[in-house]
Amino acid sequence: MPAMLAICRKLAIMAVSSFVLLVLAELAARLSEPGEFRWYDVSPYEKVENLPHVHRPRSQVQWDGTYYGINTRGWRGPEFAPTFAENEFRIIAIGDSTTFGKGVEENECWPRQLERVLQEKLGPSRKVMVANLGVNGYASRDYLEVLRTQALELKPHAVVVGFCLNDFPNVLAKVDKAVYQNQQNLRSKLSWDMRAQLGKLALFRWARATYYEINRDRDLQQVEAIARSVAQAQGENIDALGGERERLTEIVRLCREANAGLVTFLFPYESQVYLETPVEGPSQALGELSRSLDVKYLDISAEFRATAQATEPPTKLFIRGDRYHPNGRGYAIVARRVSEVLVDLGLGK
């Protein structure tokens, strides 16, 4: 009996020690994530009609590795209260998590960097105000609804729409899915519900990112090999964009009625930036569509590649363990290019 009690005591100590170590590891992982520290994740979303979800106004929570500081309008960032004075320059940023700024602090997302860059360019005589209407999980079908129901009442001088490659059918999205969501991938071994629950743990997010970093070079090589084998990789056209023409046409109409300038661009996947043979089809197709509607289109992919390849090793422009979301340096490229275009178009005068 004494021997059994000793064994039980050791097992209990090991169990408690393991639990304490896991708790400490979880806290360390949370401390390493950007933004204000929170002990646990709380969803920042609430359901509405006509959109997948919106941010709960005044949410100050941690969710999926990002701190959500949401204002009273339900947008990320400080309060947006225009006075409509003549010196105000109001800009609306619309998009998904790449516009919201998943994985970076609020001051690093491209709408907030754009506000700072433009304010410096235009000087104190103008008050630049950029509203970040990006929401994680949105797609191009939602951008029109956001413009119609939230943005136009602000009487914007400019609307900037940041499209993502998963917004419409394209060869790069298919290649990405084939590499990262195949049956051999670790992701496929876990159900969606299990991934959602595990994703609430910062330790799991850290382990997931680490797993990706370890396999990053191998995965990029697979993407490149598949992309080269797809004949349509460099030949997509407007017709491949499905319902984008209809939606973008309506966005153009609403912006013109509101006397607001419109700028579009397409966020690249990491593979587009670091592959020896980048897949240009989706960017070319969206650019062609935008230009056919007399909309200014920015080739952000080219800017990312030029910046990344200017150094050896290449500059990292995406957050750790992520194939889609830029880091602060990547968002700075977007802010700089958008600011240059807005000034060139004379929208800040």
Image (cartoon, rainbow, N blue to C red):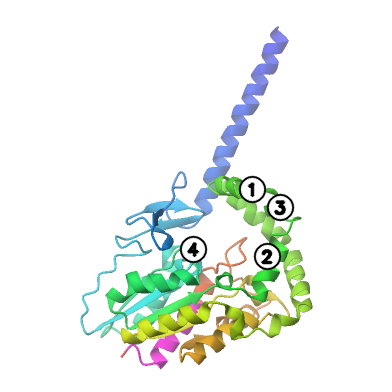
Q: Position of residue 113 (x, y in %)?
A: 42, 74
Q: Position of residue 32 (x, y in %)?
A: 53, 53
Please state, as top left, top right, bottom left or bottom right, where the N terminus lies in the image: top right
Please state which of residues 63 and 282 is positioned toward the viewer in this rendering: 282
Q: Earlier in the sequence, mark 2 or mark 1?
A: 2
Q: Which residue is mark 2?
A: 177
Say if the magenta span includes residue 204: no
Label 4: state its secondary structure.
loop
Q: Quadrant of residue 146?
A: bottom left
Q: Which mark is residue 104?
A: 4
| Residue at x 51% of width, y 53% of height | 64
Q: Earlier in the sequence, mark 4 or mark 1?
A: 4
Q: Earlier in the sequence, mark 4 or mark 2?
A: 4
Please state which of residues 24 and 142 is positioned toward the viewer in this rendering: 142
Which three-letter amino acid code belongs to the residue tagged 4?
Val
Instruction: Judge whether 33 appears above or below 161 on screen.
Output: above
Image-based side of 253 in relation to 172, left or right: left
> Looking at the image, is mark 3 or mark 1 nearer the viewer?
1
Q: Which residues are magenta?
A: 333-348
Q: Which residue is mark 3?
A: 186
Label 1: state its secondary structure.
loop
Say if the magenta span includes residue 337: yes
> How dense is the environment of label 2, judged by Cα within 10 Å: few (below 14), some, or many (20 and up)?
few
Q: Which residue is mark 1?
A: 191
